[in-house]
Image (tube, rainbow, N blue to C red):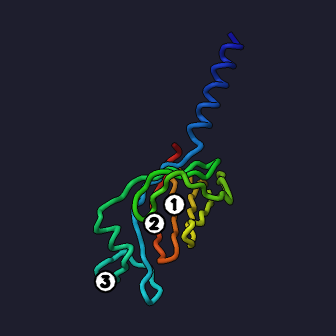
């Protein structure tokens, strides 16, 4: 009986750790930068070409990023991922953030910070893309 419980417990641990090795992230807000260097999300007051295209398209999709490999999938403009691998700086713990970045072939930089240390099921995130900066914020869950 003890062996059976040990085997079941081992299987549950391995399934649980595998299931929690990724984040599923949902964007909530997006921001552009005005010519005066101010973050904005009011497209009428502070036009930003990339932001307006994204808002007009009405597309907001979740994306997934693997905490171990950095591979990302999903999303949509301006953050479409097709299996690209982020460089992981920190996997995040109960005291630190998950931090990763990606350098596209066309230049620029994409970075994401997920506040893993927050004691909530939904972990806040900040995503930054340059050039033509766009900042996305939202929440991620273990997936």
List the residue tagged with mark 3. Answer: 45
Secondary structure beneath label 2: strand
Quadrant of the rendering where the N terminus is positioned: top right
Residue at x-position 48% and y-position 49%: 24
Residue at x-position 41% and y-position 68%: 30
The reply to whether residue 122 is visible in this rendering is: no
Q: Which of marks 2 and 3 is nearer the N terminus?
A: 3
Q: Which of marks 1 and 3 is nearer the N terminus?
A: 3
Which label is found at residue 77?
Answer: none
107 w.r.t. 8: above or below:
below
CA gap between label 1 and label 2 equals: 8 Å
Q: How crowded is mark 3: few (under 14 residues within 10 Å), some or many (20 or more)?
A: few
Which label is found at residue 125?
Answer: 1
Asked where in the image residue 61 lies, by quadrant, the reply is: bottom left
Tell me whether the residue at label 1 lies in contact with that at label 2, contact meaning CB atoms closer than 8 angstroms. yes
Q: At which x and y percent is residue 142? A: 53, 45
24 w.r.t. 51: above or below:
above
């Amino acid at each position: 009986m003890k062996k059976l419980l040990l085997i079941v417990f081992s299987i549950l641990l391995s399934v649980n750790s595998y299931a929690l090795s990724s984040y599923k992230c949902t964007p909530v807000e997006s921001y552009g930068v005005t010519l005066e260097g101010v973050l904005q999300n009011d497209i009428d007051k502070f036009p930003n070409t990339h932001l307006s295209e994204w808002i007009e398209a009405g597309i907001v999709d979740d994306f997934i990023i693997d905490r171990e490999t950095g591979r990302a999938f999903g999303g949509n403009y301006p953050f479409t991922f097709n299996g690209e691998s982020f460089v992981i700086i920190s996997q995040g713990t109960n005291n630190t953030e998950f931090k990763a970045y990606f350098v596209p072939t066309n230049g620029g930089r994409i970075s994401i910070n997920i506040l893993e240390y927050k004691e909530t099921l939904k972990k806040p995130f900040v995503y930054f893309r340059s050039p033509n900066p766009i900042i996305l914020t939202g929440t991620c869950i273990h997936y």
